[in-house]
Image (cartoon, rainbow, N blue to C red):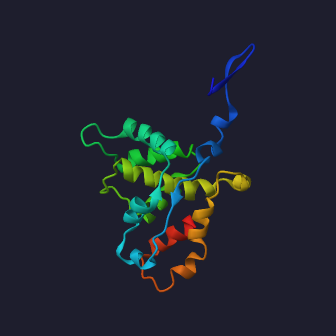
């Protein structure tokens, strides 16, 4: 079986890597940057994420299953409390709720925000990238956790690239955290 190995006397045994915190970050989502950084001046954090966060299919399906389980049957969206619960599930409870709330404040997600599947997916991607990496510790150098070469090149010298660009401090902080 793909998910279990059989032990001769004990029956099915879960494969250890399925429960390892790194299993959820085996392939990182990709964050891109616009060619002209002045585009950031007229863009909100949410608009940036929706346009420039590329979520792979395997992650999209995982996020969709979780979203579908928790979304409101009448509106088809998540409340902020349901989203926090979903994010803790995605991150295998490896982060604290105050850290999660701080991230949502930085993303300007509040109780009035309509969280549909696409927004939920990019919020999960950001949470995995920023919060999950904070809790990796000694595993930080393991393959699959870091960014790809293209993304590393995009975010190289980001502070210099953002000089003279007038953007929201939370937005600048997010970009720096992603880089």
Residue 14 place in picture, x, y as percent: 66, 27
Quadrant hosting residue 66: top left
Q: Furthest residue to the left?
A: 74
Against 113, is 63 above or below?
above
Q: Where is residue 37 in the image (x, y as percent from the top left)?
A: 45, 77
Determine the residue positioned at 37% across, 47% down.
117
Q: Does 73 sit above or below residue 104?
A: above
Q: Quadrant of residue 71?
A: top left
Q: In this view, does 143 lie to the left or right of 158?
A: right
Which quadrant of the structure image shows residue 15?
Answer: top right
Looking at this rendering, what residue extends furthest in the top direction? 9
Spot occupied by residue 107 in the image (x, y as percentages of width and height):
43, 63
Quadrant that contains the N terminus: top right
68 vs 31, nearest the viewer: 31
- Residue depicted at 44% across the width and 77% down the height: 36
Q: In this view, does 7 lie to the left or right of 117?
A: right
**Residue 87, percent from left and from top:** 48, 47
At x 74%, y 54%, the residue is 138
Q: In the figure, 114 relative to 153: above or below? A: above
Q: How many labels does the image show?
A: 0
Q: In which quarter of the image is the C terminus?
A: bottom right
Residue at 48% of width from left, 60% of height from top? 103
């Amino acid at each position: 079986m793909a998910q279990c190995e059989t032990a001769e006397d004990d029956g099915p045994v879960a494969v250890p890597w399925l429960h390892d915190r790194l299993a959820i970050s085996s392939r990182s989502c990709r964050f891109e940057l616009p060619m002209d950084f002045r585009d950031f001046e007229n863009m909100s954090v949410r608009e940036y994420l929706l346009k420039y966060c590329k979520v792979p299919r395997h992650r999209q399906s995982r996020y969709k299953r979780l979203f579908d389980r928790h979304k409101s049957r009448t509106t088809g969206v998540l409340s902020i409390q349901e989203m926090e619960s979903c994010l803790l599930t995605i991150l295998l409870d490896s982060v604290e709720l105050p850290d999660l709330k701080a991230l949502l404040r930085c993303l300007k997600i509040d109780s009035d925000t309509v969280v549909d599947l696409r927004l939920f997916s990019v919020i999960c991607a950001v949470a995995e990238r920023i919060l999950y990496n904070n809790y990796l510790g000694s595993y930080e150098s393991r393959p699959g956790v870091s960014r790809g070469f293209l993304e590393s090149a995009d975010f190289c010298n980001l502070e210099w690239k953002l000089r003279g660009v007038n953007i929201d401090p939370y937005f600048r902080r997010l970009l720096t955290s992603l880089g």
